[in-house]
Image (tube, rainbow, N blue to C red):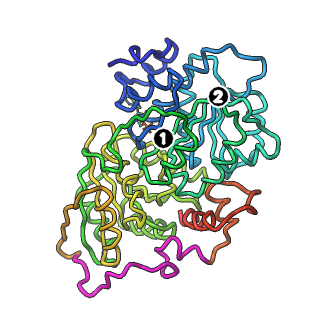
Amino acid sequence: MSFKLLGLSEPLLKAISKKGYETPSPIQAKAIPPVLDGYDVLASAQTGTGKTAGFTLPMLHILSETKKEKFRPIRALVLTPTRELAAQVYANVREYSEFLNIRSAVIFGGVNQKPQAANIRKGVDVLVATPGRLLDLQSQGLLSLKRVEIFVLDEADRMLDMGFLRDIERVMKLMPDKRQNLMFSATFSKDIKKLAFNILKNPVQVEATPENTAVEAISQKVYRVAKGLKTGLVIKLISEGNWQQVLVFTRTKHGANKLTKKMISAGITAAAIHGNKSQGARTKALKGFKDGSIRVMVATDIAARGLDIPLLPHVINYEIPNISEDYVHRIGRTGRAGAKGEAISLVSADETVYLKAIQKLIGEKLPVEIIEGFEPDPNASTEPIKPGQGRNNRRGQSQNRKPKTDRKKADGNSSRSNNRNKSRSRNRNRRSNN
Ligand code: AMP
């Protein structure tokens, strides 16, 4: 199978070959033809499968085939949950459209809106956006979605996790009914299926990995360990294994900062990446991590979403997530593009329930090991931390927070906090800890 056989135009083939891609990834081979044929597509694919090119290439092909008007209305909208993912998708759009007459722009919160609005005013064919900033600019009359022909919802499951359902519904109302819709998601809960039903018309379904299953190329392991010994164990694993590129997940921003400091004290170069970090700090950390000057990146779930890190050999769950789907997302960061990866989870007694839930979701029992000197505490309670207790609990921790500020941090949105219902508030609380 070659990209040429998929029916993509010469300028796109040139850009693909410049990127060094030789053959389409499975999701690309499956998704590109129906998208080119104008079908709605529902794709099951996680980051690392090449999904971005899976929707970007045919989208650009379609857009470039029609004659351009003097003023460029937004004809394709890609909605992503996080600014990192938006920036990454935009970078891909730019690269793939290098030899086409296509203009694109990206907008997300947390930065000044003026340059973004000015860019759009000049006319763009493709807009990549996070929901908050998109609706903000739209409500100010700075952009219109009335001419959108192709709508892409990327990482739809994460969108719902982050409480963007109402925003997605609002965005849909701003676009014409007649349009092509593409939806990508790593997991398929009931809510996702419902959303797909509402957005897509007679979709072609494509899959890169089986639903809700962990990628086979990833070797997974659990270390049972006492809570207080986790930091020591992480440092031992990284130092003794001489691991050079490790992504470590913590459940909270505070936890990420604390662990990063301890690693640095132990002589391991590390940086934290989470919602409280400025865009500049995140970009710098990611750059360092990619070029090898930073060995360990400590991240919270939402901050890590959409990070484009090819061939990541090690992922460590310092704490396992209490939302099982997050586990699949986290370990999806390793074993990318056919390379084998290792996903390690440190599990203390109070995480037992979460471990069981994860094993149920992925349909397998994870091998458990205990390392001498880092044994679990036999007297520790297996009772999970209840909401409202302890700072490791997302919902509990966020109860005292001001939702408005939290939301602003997560998506940089500022002006639309009035029409929230209870479920939004719950989801917002989840976001606030990332
Ligand atoms: P994505 O799943 O879209 O985040 O892509 C994951 C990584 O795979 C990115 O670094 C892409 O540049 C790369 N990639 C995408 N398509 C291909 C391909 N056909 N061959 C090789 N690498 C690819």
- Label the magenta part by its dominant secondary structure: loop
Q: Is residue 394 magenta?
A: yes
Q: Nearer the viewer, residue 142 or 156?
A: 156
Determine the residue positioned at 23% across, 60% down.
221
Q: Is residue 372 left or right of residue 45?
A: left
Is the CB atom of the residue marked by disc 2 within 8 angstroms of ligand 1's nearest atom?
Answer: no
Q: Residue 383, relative to residue 393: is it above or below? A: below
Quadrant for the N terminus, please: top left
In the rendered image, residue 342, in percent from the top left (x then y), is placed at 27, 52
Q: Nearer the viewer, residue 78 or 289?
A: 78
Disc nearer the start of the sequence (2/1): 2
In the rendered image, residue 169, in percent from the top left (x then y), is placed at 65, 48
Residue identified by numbered label 2: 149
The span picked out in magenta is 375-399
Q: Is residue 350 left or right of residue 287?
A: left
Badge 2 local density, few (<14 within 10 Å), some, or many (20+)?
many
Determine the residue positioned at 30% across, 70% down.
347
